[in-house]
Image (cartoon, rainbow, N blue to C red):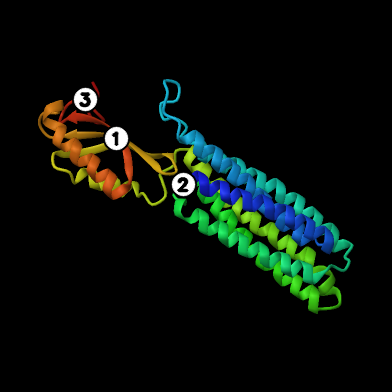
Amino acid sequence: MSRSARLGAALGINLALSVGLVLAGRAAHSTSLVADAGHNLTDAMALILALTASILASRPPSPRRTFGWSRASTLAALANGVVLVIVTVGIAGMAIGRLMHPHAVEGGVILIAALVSILLNLGVVRLLSEHNHDLGVRSALVHAVGDALSGAVVALAGFIALVGSGPLALRVDPIASLMVAVLIVVEALRVTGASLHVLLEGVPAGVDLEEVDRALRGLDEVLDVHDLHVWSISSSSHALSAHLVVAGDASIQSTQPLLLDMRHLLAEKFGIDHATVELEAEGGCGHDHPC
């Protein structure tokens, strides 16, 4: 199944589940089920954004966008992180109000609905796990895992409300809502941080800039490396620019073997698939010898 098809199937599951949880929440007078529905709805939004970004990212480069729409998935992930924060504020407000004015809930309905939510979200996780290299898909996958965890919290709350009594049984539902809100905040911070790192052209996760420098210096004929930069074009495409000082002649013909070796090294060892390098002859114009 293609990435777009998997995203579409996951989106359908999340939308149906969100509606079902809202209905179950109203029937059970449960804020935790409504919170879980809100969590699933943010997943649906994440999937819509990831699906849109997937379509945009497949568009070819143009004179105005020479890298195409590669960062569409990163922008989608950032937007989703912001939405998560807004949803969290709403869930927390609802839960605090219910804590101040508690009332009984239908524990059995909550437990059954939460267990169904867990199973369906685990299905979404399986659908998306094969394409988790893409940041937009990965953010949706993280949300689905978070939904399964929040479903477990809500299921526990439903069980306590079903078999328990006293103040805890009355307040366990809004307490579970607040716990779900905390899970959403954790996801929002993770997704937003990763997105901002890409947009700020930070060094990709898993790439050690000092190690890249040492590897380039280890190539035959390379005497020095300066102005070295590594960043992400998208979550699955990394770029490098650098100045290399080479021994002897720095002509195009004589340095072709070196450039081929360099590109192979960068791709195989560091996953860098786009490299722009300026070669400088020893003693010529460069970092230590300006013209």
Mark 2, residue position = 2
Q: Identify the mark nearer the N-term, 3 or 2.
A: 2
Q: Quadrant of residue 125?
A: bottom right
**SS type, badge 1:** strand
- Residue 118 placement (x, y as % from top left): 63, 64
Residue drawn at x 21%, y 25% as measured from the top left: 285
Can residue 39 be seen here? The reply is no
Mark 1, residue position = 242
Amino acid on which disc 1 is placed: Ala
In the visual, does 254 lie left or right of 66?
left
Q: Nearer the viewer, mark 1 or mark 2?
A: 2
Image height of 250 relative to 199, above or below: above
Asked if the residues shown at circle 1 and circle 2 are in contact, with their CB atoms under 8 angstroms apart, the answer is no
**SS type, badge 2:** loop
Residue drawn at x 58%, y 41% as measured from the top left: 49
- Residue 167 placement (x, y as % from top left): 85, 74
Amino acid on which disc 3 is placed: Cys
Mark 3, residue position = 285
Question: How dense is the environment of label 1, judged by Cα within 10 Å: few (below 14), some, or many (20 and up)?
Answer: some
Residue at mark 1 to residue at mark 3: CA–CA distance = 15 Å
Amino acid on which disc 2 is placed: Ser
Question: How dense is the environment of label 3, judged by Cα within 10 Å: few (below 14), some, or many (20 and up)?
Answer: few
Front residue of 162/64: it is 162
Question: How dense is the environment of label 2, judged by Cα within 10 Å: few (below 14), some, or many (20 and up)?
Answer: few
Q: Identify the mark nearer the N-term, 1 or 3.
A: 1
